[in-house]
Image (cartoon, rainbow, N blue to C red):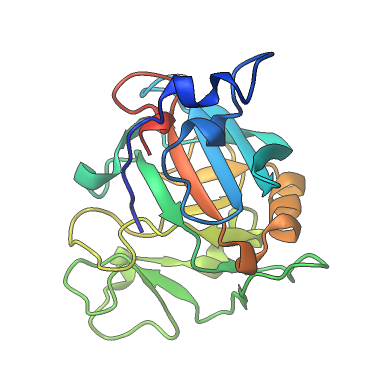
Amino acid sequence: MLRTALLAGSLVFAGLFPHGPAPLPARLADTGGGSQLITAVAPAPGSTTGRVTWWDRRAGRWFEAGSAPARFGANGLTEGATRTQGTNTTPTGLYDLPYAFGIAHAPAGTEVRYRRVAAGSWWCQDNASGSYNRWVEPLPADCAPGEAEHLVAYEKQYAHALVIGFNYERPVRGRGAGIFLHVNGKGATAGCVSVPERDMRAILRWANPRRRPHIAVGTESGALAVTRY
């Protein structure tokens, strides 16, 4: 689910963090309402690399739990609310994380819902299909094979993944489908966020559905700054 928010005023945090800037989540007016957050931040809209950091909120303060180098879409980042499908851009915004999936078994300790990929597992991206932007198994007749991802074919990238709730709750045709946080492939993504496999496994072990984790995607500054969300 996409949420937009204004940057919380810096005066609010001046007394709480007198020795330096507040942690990034503390500078967001909306973090999804839970006590876990992933931030995926690129230096600029055209960047294909950046940083993913996962955070815990305890006793009213945000603490970094881990961090990893990240890859973004081959054409950089764009505003999630106006993104166009097929542009190889990563949508910015604040999103929930509906569930995880993978070709490999879930890492020990994983608590989020985890679906195993099978030979008949697909992600439908066909705008004409009633299953647009959904996991389907098997592929329905109204979803053309050329407009769907055969998940098992991405052995490296989909060893482990988290579904990013972009355009997911109430899908808008033509905005985009199949945006995930997944394991790195050979380079930039088609719009997803990716991290090294060891870090993807760490994120899955860290994520706790009872703490309502979300992901905030954006740039360090400018119109697509992550602090907008």
Is 68 positioned to the left or the right of 178 in the image?
A: right
Q: Residue at x 70, y 47 (%)?
A: 59
In this rendering, position of residue 110 left or right of residue 153: right
- Taking the spot 43% from the left edge, 86% from the top edge, the residue there is 138
Of residues 150 and 28, the one nearer the viewer is 28
Q: Could you tell me if residue 154 is visible in this image?
A: no
How many numbered marks does the figure carry?
A: 0
Quarter where residue 210 is shown: bottom right
Q: Residue furthest front?
A: 15
Can residue 178 be seen here? The reply is yes
Q: Residue at x 42, y 53 (%)?
A: 95
Q: Is residue 152 left or right of residue 55?
A: left
* In the displayed structure image, the side of residue 148 where residue 204 appears, left or right: right
Quadrant containing the C terminus in the rendered view: top left
- Up-down relation of residue 138 to residue 111 (above or below): below
Residue 44 location in percent, x, y?
A: 41, 20
Could you tell me which residue is drawn at 62 percent across and 26 percent down?
A: 16
The part of the image, by quadrant, that contains residue 191 is: top left
Q: Position of residue 90 (x, y in %)?
A: 38, 40
Quadrant of the rendering where the N terminus is positioned: bottom left
Whole-percent x, y for residue 184 in the image: 62, 43
Foreground residue among 210 and 59 = 59
Where is 100 relative to 8, above or below?
Answer: below
- Nearest to the observer: residue 12 or residue 47: 12
Between residue 222 and residue 10, name the one nearer to us.
10
Q: Residue furthest top?
A: 19
Residue 151 in picture, x, y percent from top left: 51, 67
Q: Is residue 67 above or below residue 197?
A: above
